[in-house]
Image: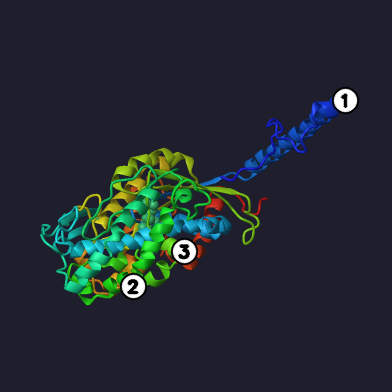
Amino acid sequence: MRQRNSVSYDSGHTWPPPPTENEETETQRAERLEQEKEAKRISDEIDKAIEQQRQEMKSKRPQMKILLLGQAESGKSTMLKNFQLHFTPKAFKAESGAWRAVIHLNLVRSVNFILDLLSPNPQFNIPTSPASSVIVTRFDGLGISQAADTQPASFSGPIIEPTDELKRLRMRLSPLKRVEEMLSKRISADDPQPSRKGLNSASEVSVRSGSGWKALARLSHRTRPQSPNELEDAGRVIEACRDDITELWADPLVQKGLAGNEIVLQEQSGFFLNEVSRIASKDYVPTPEDILKARLQTMGVEEHHLIMETGQFSTESGREWVIYDVGGSRGQRPAWAPFFDDVNAIIFLAPISAFNQTLSEDRSVNRLWDSFYLWQSICTNRILSNMTIILMLNKVDVLETKLNSGISFAKYVTSYKDSPNDLEHVSKYLKAKFTAIHRQHSSRSRKLHIHLTTATDHQATSIILVRIRELILTNNLIDSDFV
Ligand SMILES: Nc1nc2c(ncn2[C@@H]2O[C@H](COP(=O)(O)OP(=O)(O)OP(=O)(O)O)[C@@H](O)[C@H]2O)c(=O)[nH]1
Ligand SMILES: [Mg+2]
């Protein structure tokens, strides 16, 4: 939260400094002390008036509070970034440098993931080929169920048998393991979380709420002169590896090996391998699009204060919006409930592209099924019965790519039967299912606001956010033109 700067008269650091004792007569001293007393009285009065005004403003323009909910990787933090980019662009820009380290880490993770596939002893926690296990979702009437079609298979030895050229690249890129460790440690600060790595996802890096990671990840020895500049070193190593990374990613055997194991790195969070030459360059500065694509797992509940900036929405300018961004993995969901009765609206994100994926925290659970289950529990919750709820069916771009590439929706959602495998029909079907769950499980009838979103597309998302802002203000009986 931004704070008002104030001058302390008690600090003893007045300017100009008071004359020394032998330059000042007794009368002059008394006069000076009287003047200082008067100055302090006036200053206190001004402070009091400002505080009173602030309180009045606050009571006229109450804070708006939004809670972002949804499973892990549904796009909650990305939606928060959209709010910041749209409503507080100056603050967003001021923080953008901190994302450089995260994007470098995302890039290095993808490279190390491929290097692991080439390794004689792959370091994957879960010996499961995604091709061998299909967890399906079914709708039985209005109920939802899930089942495994086949058992997971295990593997041994390298997943992609490397040629001599690939072995050479593996050697040359080996310093990136150290870079990944260093960047993870730096971003996670003193509280690194254990990473999880499966064949269909690279390891995760997370930050605990309030850990101040942005300050730690800012590329500046000026602000941390006491520590060696590891971030600059990491940037130099990545830059030196730039051509080798490009070569590794373009290697036909790597591409074939990935495809053969149904690994689509492009669909994974924080994928930057197609932009190596730009991101691995010395002068790289993240663009807003890069920041929206960056992946950093949230742990706990983060509270973000957005002070609406002047410009586009002058009537809203200065109002404070509080957005709670939560960690979405199963173990973190109990932390959500205490926020339920203290917010004006909930935005629930369901990543509808995840129909053929399983939860990284539990490989036996289909991600779409989990979203339906979570949505049902939000709809059922009595504390939320009067709450404005906005449902975002997110990752529409990924859903479309998957369907267009021939991945069958009906194979994973068996109740879809033989309806057309295209975006229009699948999204209509999903909208109807989410709406039906809402209707059936809400204790009171209420309007549901659904949006199909691609949170990485800022322009399209902005239009939706403006509508959501109006909706929340209206539903909370607040006229946005009030002050
Ligand atoms: N292509 C695409 N990527 C998206 C979309 N929405 C989010 N992402 C990406 O998906 C990844 C995960 O998004 P996050 O916003 O970190 O997910 P989250 O819900 O905050 O996840 P947790 O913090 O683990 O609960 C990020 O790399 C985003 O850039 C989308 O609509 N399309
Ligand atoms: Mg998050």
Q: Nearer the viewer, mark 1 or mark 3?
A: 1
Q: Secondary structure at mark 2?
A: helix
User: Which residue is tagged 3?
Assistant: 286
Q: Secondary structure at mark 1?
A: loop
Label 2 crowd (10 A; few <14 / some 14-19 / many >=20): few
Residue 371 vs residue 271, the one in the foreground: 271
Q: Position of residue 190 (x, y in %)?
A: 38, 42
Q: Nearer the viewer, mark 2 or mark 1?
A: 1
Q: Which mark is residue 345?
A: none
Residue 399 picture quarter: bottom left
Residue 326 vs residue 161, the one in the foreground: 161
User: Which residue is tagged 2?
Assistant: 243
Q: Is residue 446 left or right of residue 55?
A: left
Kind of residue at badge 3: Pro
User: Which residue is tagged 1?
Assistant: 25
Sequence-first tag of 2 and 1: 1
Kind of residue at badge 1: Thr
Q: Position of residue 110 (x, y in %)?
A: 30, 63
Q: CA distance from mark 3 to mark 2?
A: 20 Å
Q: CA distance from mark 2 to mark 1?
A: 77 Å
Label 1 crowd (10 A; few <14 / some 14-19 / many >=20): few
